[in-house]
Amino acid sequence: MKYEFDIKSSNTIIYCKKWKETVDFYKSILKLDITVEKNWFVEFQLAQNSTLSIADEKKSSIKSARGRGITMALEVEDAIEVWECFKNRDANICEPLKIHPWGAYVFYLKDPEGNRIEIWSKK
């Protein structure tokens, strides 16, 4: 199906009650590069045209979903290597690395706001 518009980039914004802790998680645990930093809003680079923003709900009209109904799936080159790296950090890994039924290595983290992050790679 051809869209009637071309998407040039994407950004997901997560509104947080635990804003400082969540920003620190993405900066210190996931070690994502910051592209924009304000006193209530931080944008991280995920991939070439994909970013993730963390916004303080206290300074926004949108409130936190508190991690309900959200999974951010991130494909990496080698999930086993990333899992080994995150085991040595306080990364809040939810379950051990496993082989997913659709044939990929996968594990899950939770950020301080409760958002589920799936890290996976092809088997």
Image: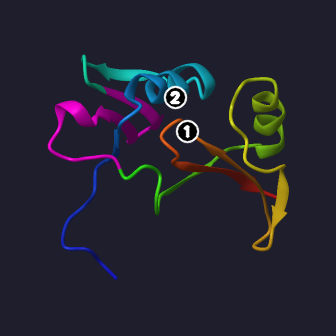
Residue extent of the magenta highlight: 42-64
Q: Residues within 10 Å of mark 1 (few under 14, many from 20)?
A: many
* Picture residue at 77% right of the left edge, 43% below the top: 78
Amino acid type of the residue tagged 1 in the rendering: Asp
Q: Is residue 78 magenta?
A: no
Of all residues shown, which one is farthest toward the left? 61
Q: Residues within 10 Å of mark 2 (few under 14, many from 20)?
A: many
Q: Secondary structure at mark 1?
A: loop
Circle 1 residue: 111
* Picture residue at 77% right of the left edge, 45% below the top: 79
Q: Where in the figure is residue 63, as x and y percent of width and height?
A: 26, 47
Q: CA distance from mark 2 to mark 1?
A: 8 Å
Which image quarter: residue 16?
A: top left
The answer to whether residue 52 is seen in the rendering is yes
Which image quarter: residue 18?
A: top left
* Picture residue at 79% right of the left edge, 28% below the top: 85
Q: Secondary structure at mark 2?
A: helix
Picture layout, residue 119 above or below residue 99 = above
Of all residues shown, which one is farthest toward the bottom? 1
CB atoms at circles 2 and 1 under 8 Å apart? Answer: yes
Q: Where in the figure is residue 31, as x and y percent of width and height?
A: 58, 23
Circle 2 residue: 26
Q: Is residue 107 left or right of residue 21?
A: right
Which image quarter: residue 93?
A: top right
